[in-house]
Structures are given as C-alpha cells and as structure tokens.
Image (cartoon, grey):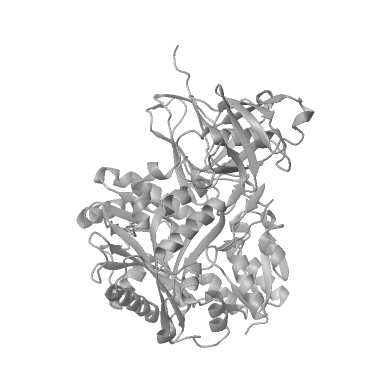
Amino acid sequence: MFQRILIANRGEIACRVIDTARRLGVETVAVYSDADAEARHVAMADRAVRIGPPPAAESYLNGAAIIEAARATGAQAIHPGYGFLSENPDFAEAVAAAGLVFVGPSAKAIRAMGLKDAAKALMERAGVPVVPGYHGEDQSPERLSREARRIGYPILIKAVAGGGGKGMRRVDDPSRFAEALEGAKREAKGAFGNDAVLIEKYVSTPRHIEVQVFGDGIHAVHLFERDCSLQRRHQKVIEEAPAPGMTPAMRTAICEAAVRAAMAVGYSGAGTVEFIADASDGLHPSRFWFMEMNTRLQVEHPVTEAVTGVDLVEWQLRVASGEPLPRRQEDLRLHCHAVEARLYAEDVPAGFLPATGRLAHLRFPGGVRVETGVREGDEITPWYDPMIAKLVALAPTRAEALVKLGRALDETRVAGCVTNLGFLSALVRHERVRAGEVDTGLIARDLDRLVPSGPPPPEAVAVAALAAAGPADGPLAGFHLWTPLSRRVDLRWKDEPQAVTLALAGPRGARITMDGRTREAARGEDGWRIGSGAAFDAVAEPTRVTVFGGREGTWVFDHSDPLDRDVDATGHDVTASPMPGLVRAVLVAAGQAVAKGDRLVVVEAMKMEHALSAPRDGRVAEVLVAEGEQVEAGAPLVRLEAEDG
C-alpha cells in the first residue's frame, strides 16, 4: 500500500478519497486553486499545495503543476477523482513518466473508451450491443444531416469526447438540425477542446442503467447495476441501486456485457459501463445498448458501496498499488436498496441555472450518508460545479429508502443560496418514481408538478417576518427595542411586497397580522407553528430570510430597506445574465430587428450553454457585452429600443 498519495481534485470527491486513505493509514496531499484556499478538502488533508488561480484551466487542469506538487511532497501516486484530469490519457502517461502511479486505468484503456465513436466500434467487436447511429470521421454538416435522416428522427447529437450532457442535443425535426449541430459543436469545443460529434437514435422510453465494473488488468468483476434515469438536461439527479424492475435475466445479460467491455481493454481500476434500455414494455435482455464507458469513479458510486458493502476507493488504492482484485465475482452480493440525491446550488424555476452564494447556514440530518466538500460559511463560486452534497439513504427495501431520503431532504437546511431541495423532495415522492416507473424523460414531462411556482403560504411569510424581527433564542428577542407593542416588517418575495405586523404574545409567542387577518404563533423545538399547522423554521441574514417548510418547500425573502437598494438595471427592454458566466456568442447587432423568443446571447456557466432570448418583438438598441467577456449575475447584455408610447 502507498504511504502518501496526492489527490488531483477538489470538493466532495477529494474529501471522500481522504476519508478512505486516512482509514488505511495513507497520508494525503491536497491541491487547491486560489478560490479553494480555505476549502474543506484542504483542511482535511495532511498537506496542501497551491497550483494556480481560480480558472480550472490554470489550476485543476494544469497537469504539470499537479505532478510537480506530487514530486515535491513525496507522494507515490495521484488519485484523479472524477472530472478534470480523471479521463485524460496524456495526464495518465505523464504521471507514469514522472515515476508516479496513476490511480486508475491505463492511458491505453482511457483512449480506447474516451472517444465515443471508437468505443462503440470496439464494443461491437467485443459482442456488446450498441445503439444504432453514425460514428464516422466525416464531420461535414451535410454528411451528419444525411446520417440523421437515415437513422430516423428523433436523434441525439453527442460530443465524441463528451460527458455530463455537455455537447449534447436532442433533435426531433430536420429543420432544427443545423442549429442544434452548431450549438453542440461549439459547446463540445469549449468543454473538451474537440468539436467532433456522433449521431445516435433517440430511444423514446429510455432507462439509463449503468454497471459498476472493476478490474486489475487481468480479471474483471461487476458490482451490479445502478439506475440513473432521473435526469434533467442530461445530468443525473437521483441514482439508485439496484435498478427498479430489474429481472434476473436482464441483470445477467447487462452485467456480463459490462464485464466483456472491461475485459476488451484489459481494464484496471474502477469504471462504469453505461447502457440505455428501452423500457416501453419493461426491462428485457434484448433491449439494451452500450452508450459509453466512464474510465473513472462515478459521482454516484456511494449507492453501489451501500448495497454491496465495498469501499471502491479502497479497491482503487489496493489495485493501483499492485494487489489483485479483493473479491471474486461469486463473493459479491446485493444486500439492500440505496438511493442518492444530488443537492445543488441552482435556481430550479429559472431552468436549473447554477447559483452562487455564501452558505450562511448548513445542516444535514442524521440517519443518511452525506458526501460533501463544503462547510457552513463556505462560498459556492462560479468557477466550479455547484454541488453542495450528496445524500444517500439505505434501507432493506426501495420503498423504505425513498421514504428515508424524502425525510432527510426535508430536514436538510441550506441558507445563503438557492438550491434544488424542494425539487428533490417532490421528485422522490412522485407517484411514478415511487412505483419504479422511471425513464429519462420523466422530469421534463412533469416539470410543472416538480417545480414550485405559486407564492409562499401565509405561514411562511409570517415566520420570515418573525425571523427578520429578532433572533430565535427568545421570540422577538430585541423586538422591544423597537417598540413595546408592535412592529411592522416589510418583506419581499420575488419583488412582491409582503407587509406583516408583529406583536408579542407571551414568552414564546407572537401575534401576526397580515392581509387583514391575525394569526397566533408559538415557537417549539422544531420551529414556529402558526395555529395548528406544520412547523416552519427560518434563518435570518442581514438582508434576507430563508424559511424551511419541509416537504412544503423552502422560500427566500428579502428584508432589506427598499430605500437602500440599488435600482435594477434590467427590465422589459434589457436582457440580463441570470447567472455568472462567460459570454460564448453574441448573435445580434445594434439596429437588428428581433422577434420575441429570438436568441440574443449564449452564456456559458459550469461548462453548460444557456441561450438568452428576446423578451418581446423590437429592435436592438445596444449590445452591452462582447464574446469572451466574463459577466456577473444580473449584468445587462442586450438592450432593446423603447416601445413607442
């Protein structure tokens, strides 16, 4: 076993690797950018080395700096985590050339599986079923369009060097192909430095089922399957193991195919073989096809660890240090059911846009496994993925695991940035999810039901006013400093004013008047109760209050003085950036006529492109940004000429 390893990553995966290394008695070296100087993974490691400024290209993607940090600190091996350099064969080779061990597969295996077109050809030769499509070298728009027509719409355009939904477009109609191809190639170029794409048949009722494999270069085993069908914009949201509705025949077929895929490249280390299954009539051994192989540890690996009792990071370190596979296939068993939810800083109603902010309050419940790379007080920046944590519930049955996860989500507390907590809570309680009738289109079809759209209930407004009036360690403590009788609190929710009048009512109570109605509030150990309703808790910051209502939802109210607030620069005439990002494309010019819905600017955030459209018909008065410019959330991008009258 190694004595010291360097972890070429950040966030929760770096913390995850440190946990196992510490248990094995292996010292760890963290690397960090200037944006992560105070990060949790830096504090956890035995040593830490700065590798550059915040942009990933100048820090976490700087292979030379990372290798130099490993050599300078006496590390014997480099664990790449996932993302960044984890699937970069040139980096794997450079690590070996420096006399270090790359904790992962060989550069040859990474290359073989790294390009989707070549990987599918290899899988066909290995007897692994593949999706009908075009994986050729001719990348001309004419050839790609012709192949799309041959395959038959709907089709998927996918970056050959891609992953995580980047450089991917679904196209339902030939008239939309050219525009989708242009966007996919541009996004692929920006994310992977390679704009080549492939075309695949789109399966109408798809299930995303993947198999965890592990090899030592000679032998390979599978650790059963995971279902990752609950996705939004091709990004996984909830993952589980085993897959619901899985039959013994289907499991045998898909897992054996995954092992054949691993053996075809002499695989060493942890890997995931991803398949798409046609679930239009249940799962069947003849209706699944290879999509890609991820030659690294997956974000969702904890669900496999939970159901098998295997520490995959320990296996990675043991195999990389020269040991054989720790277990034979016949020794591996499924023990229970596990479900994982990814908690993100993102604005769900705005289209799952990544969000930023300082975590003013962060609390996780007991009873579930929590993987996180942040602490209370840390900042979610625009530089990296906005994941806050993964919550994993383990139970004897799937139904029990879903209930346990739903309760854990309700008890999670995050203040300081918007999150997808309410969306996740609604998703795990969706009747089709509970029934195991999942597919990759479920979220898109039922988005209106999953995304809260109505105003907050009066109870939430009341609790926000109570939190804004004074700290919770005594109802309205400090309240009497303003007036001994009552106080008016002015709130705003999405710029809608909410006026509330509060009055003391005993040592742990208050009387709330709003909209002409008075309600009684009492504070208990689980938060404020308005009348006989459910308990609501809240966290107050200097200018806003976050109210937690469990499965009812989470709401953020502004309570700063309106006279102190800067005038909003945006409006009906101005299109603003909804998040911090990089301007990838400016599609209009001053004087150009546009129609409502026309694309104006493309902004990239977290390596995903977001097209911003004209709010109305009109003429462009001014373009306020240039391609390549970094913008903040709310920055004005394009202004239209004022409407007459």
Q: Position of residue 35 (x, y in %)?
A: 67, 54
Looking at the image, is 333 positioned above or below residue 481? below
In-front residue for pair 481/512 = 512
At 41% across and 73% down in the image, what residue appears?
A: 112
Find the residue positioned furthest to the top.
Answer: 645
Q: Which residue is found at the position 33% from the left and 57% from the top?
A: 439
The residue closer to the viewer here, 130 or 599, is 130
User: Viewer-proximal residue, 394 or 645?
Assistant: 394
Give the residue at the far right of this rendering.
Answer: 481
Question: Is 567 placed above or below 128 here?
Answer: above
x and y percentages locating residue 90 in the rendered image:
52, 71
Position in image of residue 479 (x %, y %): 74, 31
Q: Is residue 121 above or below residue 470?
A: below
Say whether residue 171 is visible.
yes
Q: How many numbered marks are there?
A: 0
Q: Is residue 3 left or right of residue 595?
A: right
For the point 49% across and 71% down, the residue is 306
What residue lies at 59% left-to-right and 75% top-to-bottom?
95
**381 or 99: nearer the viewer:** 381
The reply to whether residue 167 is in sight is no
* The N terminus lies in quadrant: bottom right
